[in-house]
Image: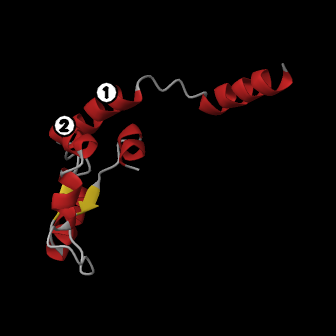
């Protein structure tokens, strides 16, 4: 859902803490071990709350100023999503029709 938020230029607060994880490794650390997430987070397009209070503070910051990280969201949108022609449903239906009917 982070890519969708970038497409619509909406702030993102990732929750990087939990209370039920049995592992010594915290959620944030586990996520950052994933190469695809480590790469995308290099664009500084979202925040990661490591505590409940950080989540509250980051949400309040975005409410006051939704443009925080907007440049990063724009870069992620361009790098990962490409051109948004606005006709995805039309293309999907055409592809399905072409493949089913012929």
Image spot of residue 52 (x, y percent): 19, 75
Q: Which quarter of the picture shows residue 19?
A: bottom left
Q: Earlier in the sequence, mark 1 or mark 2?
A: 2
Image spot of residue 7 (x, y percent): 40, 38
Residue under the image location 15 percent in, 72 percent down: 51
Residue under the image location 24 percent in, 39 percent down: 40
Which residue is outermost to the front? 23
Residue under the image location 27 percent in, 41 percent down: 36
Given contact means CB atoms under 8 Å apart, are the residues at marks 1 and 2 in contact? yes
Q: Residues within 10 Å of mark 1 (few under 14, many from 20)?
A: few
Image spot of residue 49 (x, y percent): 18, 64
Q: Which mark is residue 102?
A: none
Say what secondary structure mark 1 lies in: helix
Q: Which residue is mark 1?
A: 79
Q: Which quarter of the picture shows residue 4?
A: top left
Image spot of residue 82 (x, y percent): 41, 24
Say what secondary structure mark 2 lies in: helix
Tell me how many marks there are: 2
The residue closer to the viewer here, 82 or 26, is: 26
Report if residue 61 is visible in the image.
no
**As drawn, is 40 to the left or to the right of 50?**
right
Q: Residues within 10 Å of mark 2 (few under 14, many from 20)?
A: some
The residue closer to the viewer here, 83 or 23, is: 23
Q: How is the image coloured?
A: secondary structure
Mark 1 vs mark 2, CA separation in Å: 10 Å
Q: Which quadrant would the C terminus be assigned to in this image?
A: top right
Report if residue 73 is visible in the image.
yes
**As drawn, is 40 to the left or to the right of 42?**
right
Vertical relation: 14 (above or below) 55? above
Q: Which residue is mark 2?
A: 43
């Amino acid at each position: 859902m982070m890519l969708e938020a970038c497409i619509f230029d909406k702030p993102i607060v990732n929750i990087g803490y939990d209370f039920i994880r049995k592992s010594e490794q915290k959620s944030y650390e586990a996520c950052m071990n994933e190469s695809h997430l480590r790469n995308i987070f290099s664009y500084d397009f979202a925040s990661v709350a490591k505590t409940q209070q950080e989540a509250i503070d980051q949400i309040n910051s975005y409410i006051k100023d939704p443009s925080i990280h907007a440049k990063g969201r724009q870069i992620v949108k361009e790098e990962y999503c490409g051109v948004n022609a606005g006709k995805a449903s039309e293309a999907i239906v055409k592809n399905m029709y072409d493949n089913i009917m012929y």
